[in-house]
Amino acid sequence: MIEDLVVGLAGSGGDGVVSAGESLLAAASSQGFYAMMTKSFGSQIRGGESSCRVRLSTRKVLNPGGVLDVAVALNWEDFRRFGAELPIGPGTVLIHEAKAGPPPADLAPSGRMPREVIGVPLAELAKASAGTDRAKTTIVLGVLSGWFGVPQEALDRGLQKKFAQKGEGLLEANRKALARGISFAAEHPLAAPRALARPEASAPKLLCDGNEMCASAAIFSGCEFFGGYPITPSTEVMQILSRELPRYGGVVLQAEDEISGVGATVGASFAGKKSMTATSGPGMSLKTEMLGLASIAELPLVLLNVQRGGPSTGMPTKPEQADLFQAAFSAHGDVLRPVLAPSSVEDTFRLTVEAFNLAEKYQTPVVILSDQEIAQRKETVDPIDVSRFEVLERLRPTSEQLTGGYQRFAETPSGVSPLSHPGMQGGNYLAAGIEHDVKGAPTASGATHAAMNTKRFRKLAPLQERSDLFERQGPPDAPIALVSWGSSAGVAREAFALARARRLPVKLLIPSLLYPVAEPVYRAFFASVRAGLVLELSHQGQLYRVLRMFVDVPPGVTSFARSGAQPFRADELLERLEQQAEALR
Amino acid sequence: MNAFLAPNDYKSPLKPIWCPGCGDYGVLQALYRALSAVGRPPHEIAFISGIGCSSRIPGYTTAYGFNTLHGRALPIAQGVKLANPDLLVIVAGGDGDGFSIGGGHVPHVIRRNVDLTYLVMDNQVYGLTKGQLSPTSPRGLKTVTSPMGSLEQPINPLLTVLAYGAGFVAQATPADMPGMTALIEEAIRYPGFSFVNIQSPCITFGEEDQQLKAHKARMKPLASLGHDPANQLAALDLARAYGTELYTGVFYRNPSPPPTYDALVRQRQVELQKGEPRSRSRVLDGYLKA
């Protein structure tokens, strides 16, 4: 029995491999498995190549997995396009459409081809059983069920749901195809049989992706306004809020451009509402000026940037972690803007709530740096007890302050000044992008400017102490550090667990707060460290470089970084950690 | 409802940075009077502007002001109005702010018909940066960035705004203070997006024929021409003369104003919130798979 199964499927756009992956995901999650599914496409709107990868496990799934346990190729050309996204190795069971012929000899980049390669006449079996070769992905589900123990009853229930609206005939045909796939598997047993263990408990789980989690957390946090412009891969957040927010009394504005989207968000925040916008790299570039305005006018605002491959249009449908510099530093003038990064779908809920809290508490724009993988991968999540989350509101002036010469930017020990909004009598003030004195009156005084900069930085100083925004695992005195963030953190967690199982002296650090760099946290973490890796999916290794700006990173700690769309694998990471441990011996 | 508010109740203690003789002083005075006539207390007014000489105007009032970014007053004002439709939202800026850097926002606020009043102080030149070409500068104008004379045709604010479908379009000049005051008041009272192009002379960089004295001689009140403001085609025809004739008054006023965007948004919210109120803490329930 195996406890973990990683399946990758690839075909052309019309083949329905993603739909098959969704069926697999739904079936597994309904049986109490933990599961995760990532999708990957060419950039075509319709057609082109498409693929998905589904990981099923009896334990919590930390990442989409490395080398595939099972690869399904409907044709070789499309399969090959996904390269490192669907890696195969000697242990992979490679299933392919029989009429596509045997796999090309150079299919495995490592040169190590799977030992078990099975041609299944998918179209032929589909035609014979269901009367149409369109049911070939249902044949795939059948063989997966037969060979790997994906429960047939759950797949069957999935078919019922999927085809309920499409007529009895289609449902019956697909049921026949499922049965035929299962019988084919029985007729052709695997040389090395393997089947999934059944999960112990089957408590209900949430099934959603990072964008759904973010939109839900925004609603939970009391968001009342969203302004934005469609952009892959963040658009789903606007789509969900367009449907849901008005039901809670909120407003969504699909603006004419990215600038207007964030502009309306700034306006709504000025008017007293919790406000949010969402975008990806190109949109973030356009929104930058408005973030500077929110910083100097001290207005709360949450901005979600779902990172994709860049620069410029880059690779809109692929993940990358190369927008950290932009999130932290894209501003003229002295600006400190908090940047948070969720490291899983579940984590997206917590950090979106945190982003709203920081924005409201410190009257500042806050950036959530998600990425295409987390935003669009669907996974099972244990139910979240939302009552453990505190929801903060902005500091508003008291009635005494409103009747006694209200000062919008009053000097306070914390640097946070009570914030009024239009409609509040006595709170009238001038907000501005221009430097201002405590009352909001424009100024060109160097002394006032310095005092205001000090105030705007002082209010964010408590972030230095937020060690709760860092996940630490492993022995505190371990000499090897593994640091990662965002979607790569899921791989780091798995590699860390493997390393600990091999008794390597490693500890793990996953920062949720990327910027400002919480120096005391890193100082304490790095104190025992002599070697290590900072793992991230970007050419430059941006977190590594940001850390070196602010912290004395031990010289033995190096960057392990590569460009997007080539996700890390736990096994390669483990190998590196072993090398480091060896070197320390 | 409210005690009488005098024009001075809308006047802030800040002293304008404008040059002596700037047309914007007149606009400010007319605005105080119009706001007094409308009677909304200053804390219920949000006055949003962009960047430029004229965009300093919110700070000279006692309303909630927001002196935003160059060209971005309209997006921010829409966010304010949609977040709180009960506010009176006024937007102001110059011709460069509204029709050059911010020109992309104008058609969209108009097609949405958000209930804002947009006052453009059009002086056909960039004043704050000291005398460069603006989108409404006449062809041939010599400025520091067009030393041999401009080769560009100016944009026609009246014609474009009318063509985008605005429900209220007027033009004013500080050379006629009672007329300008009345137009601003009427624009504020119009239920929907309203636009007033104010020919506000730049005393420092403006042309001789754009000054108040010339305005007084040239201006032609549309009412005196027998123009019917309900006639959109006639308004378009008259607007073509921007740059040659100085017509003042209402070019177009939609006789049956359609519902505003903000009103429709609110109506939909009310419809969707009928029945049991939704609990924000149950937002994840829909993702639970048994």
Image (tube, rainbow, N blue to C red):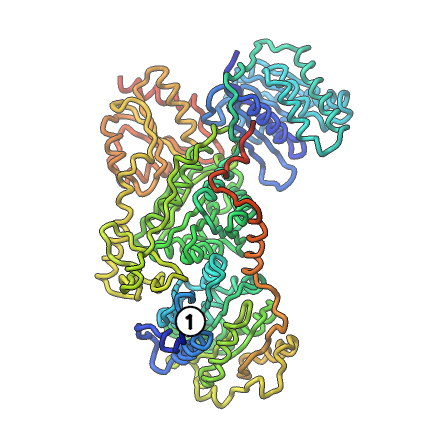
As drawn, is B248 to the left or to the right of A155? Answer: left
The answer to whether residue A92 of the structure is visible from this angle is: yes
- Quarter holding the C terminus of chain A is top left
Residue shown at 32% from the left, 74% from the top: B17
Q: Which residue is identified by label 1?
A: B2
Q: Quadrant of residue A535?
A: top left
Instruction: Tell me if residue A177 comes above or below residue A285 in the rendering.
Output: above
Residue B282 x, y percent position in the rendering: 49, 38
How many labels were placed on the picture?
Answer: 1
The answer to whether residue A332 of the structure is visible from this angle is: no
Residue A24 x, y percent position in the rendering: 60, 25
Instruction: From the viewer's side, name the closer residue of A151 and B86.
Output: B86
As drawn, is A256 to the left or to the right of B142? Answer: right
SS at mark 1 in the image:
loop
Instruction: From the viewer's side, name the closer residue of A30 and A492.
Output: A30
Residue A287 x, y percent position in the rendering: 44, 53
Instruction: Tell me if residue B135 comes above or below residue A228 in the rendering.
Output: below
Instruction: From the viewer's side, name the closer residue of A291 and A122.
Output: A291
* Disc 1 packing (10 Å; few <14; some 14–19; many ≥20): few
Q: Amino acid at mark 1?
A: Asn
Instruction: From the viewer's side, name the closer residue of B111 and B201.
Output: B111
Residue shown at 53% from the left, 65% from the top: B115
Q: Quadrant of residue B229?
A: bottom right
Residue shown at 61% from the left, 31% from the top: A18
Residue A84 x, y percent position in the rendering: 51, 28
Subunit ID for the residue under disc 1: B
Give the farthest residue toward the bottom.
B217
